[in-house]
Image: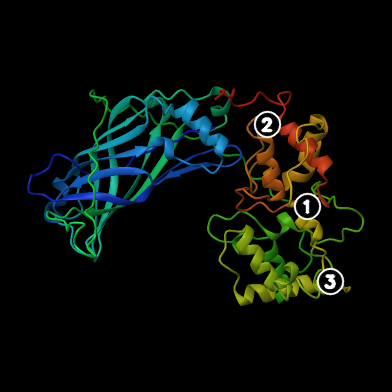
Amino acid sequence: MKKLFLSMMVLSSAAFAEDPQWVKTRGFVRFMVEGPLDDVIGETRQSSGVLTFSPEAWSKGTGAIAVELGSIRTGIDQRDKDMRIEFLETSRFPRAVLTIDSIERPSAPALANGASVTGTVVGSFELHGVRRAVKVPVTLKLDAEGHVRVGGRFEVPFSDYNVQRPQRLFLKLGDVAQVSFDMGFEKREEKPATAATPGAPLPVAVVVVSPTVTQVQPAAAKPPKPKPPRKPKPALVFTYQFKGDDAKAKGEKLFHSPAAGGEGNKMTCFHCHAKQDERDGLLLKDGHVRAANTMYNAGQRPKFWGGFAATAGKAAGICQKQYMLGSGLSSEQEEQLQAFIDAISPDGAPVLDYTTTYRSMETLLRDPTGGDAAKGKKLADKFCMTCHLDGRVGPVWAPGLYEPDWVVRRVRRLEGHQNKQMPNWTIARLPDSDLRDIVTYLTSPASAAPVFDRKKE
């Protein structure tokens, strides 16, 4: 479904005969491509490489590294299969190879113990049968144990490497992969201990890495392509009930603020919870239904989160970790949210019955594509657009892009759901019949042609 491939920085083969070799022992290569539902993020730890350099003159080093493209995983098995077959064609081009011929603009002449240096690798990158000249900014650090850590990032435009993107899908995706890497290398000892030596470590194996394409094409011209301005983000409509600077007013502001979460968070408490009485119905004035119960009259429950939290403030801290990319609220934030929820809770309330939640997370939806696509489109606006309207928490829906069971797993938070921020919708708030219509709308050929024509095994 999206593209990936990667490569890395490094140094290998040629250099001075007396320079030591450093063998790749750990680390990852990761890529990211902008997408309509989620940015596609892929990662692999299956790579091999050798650097040849002396810390006293590290900028004279050379090297190469190869990434096994078939090992890249994005978290969705079918998407990974499509990527290997339709996009990277790993049966023909199993590796991406970065070779390092020289290093420009070193920040220091020597790589001292415990210090970091930066420079620009000059070499070539091979992908999909095309090898081009590249320049990659890198950082090296030599730690106290004598290991070298290498990291950096660069862009790989698909068109530069003759990667034919599936058109229907990639009209909706970015055309460049942002590749990053972080790898560890260990020096290969001249006389490694033998396996016969009791307790001695085995020698580090050296894997020879070589490009398969002889001709190195010049770096592709990159004319400036200004990005079109992003659409303004349509915020959820709400009004503050409390003014001033007391705890409940601060708690209400926190209830509506993505700053309550961690770095990169867009979610707010209000995306999942209403703050109004839902006895007249679940549909709010903004036209959306929330995934979780309202906070109105929630403050006097005897326990929260099925007994894991004794107060609403402590429960908010669990929510923040689960859905808002956070590491926990401060005690002051918990107290402020508690004061706000108490202020909108005039009546006593019973413990929530979590049986419905557990039942919702037990089984996949029966006949997920047997619904009504026209109804599903309207229901998606009602249930999903609190977060999936352009500019809000989640990306815009793209019919034709998803597998039916994958959608159900994300919505119900079944095993393998791969969710990070999305809460689960229970059968009490989103019945199976409505979910079936939504899944049918998102996956029916009548809504949009499937992204991939699946190839038979």
Q: Which of these two is toward me, 381 or 439?
A: 439
Name the residue: 28% across, 34% down.
134
Name the residue: 81% across, 73% down.
301
Q: Which residue is labeled 1 in the image? A: 426
Q: Can residue 10 be seen in this view?
A: no
x%, y% of residue 380? 76, 39
Kind of residue at disc 1: Thr
Q: Is mark 3 on a helix, strand or loop?
A: loop
Corner quadrant of residue 173: top right
Do tag 3 and tag 2 residues touch (Cβ < 8 Å)?
no
Do tag 2 and tag 1 residues touch (Cβ < 8 Å)?
no
Name the residue: 61% across, 39% down.
37
Q: How far apart are marks 3 and 1 (CA)?
A: 23 Å
Kind of residue at disc 3: Ser
Q: Which residue is labeled 3 in the image? A: 345
Q: Which of these two is toward me, 311 or 222?
A: 311
Q: Can residue 343 be seen in this view?
A: yes
Q: How far apart are marks 2 and 1 (CA)?
A: 23 Å
Q: Which of these two is toward me, 221 or 365?
A: 365
Q: In this view, does 46 lie to the left or right of 385?
A: left
Q: Is residue 116 left or right of residue 367?
A: left
Q: Is mark 1 on a helix, strand or loop?
A: loop
x%, y% of residue 275? 80, 62
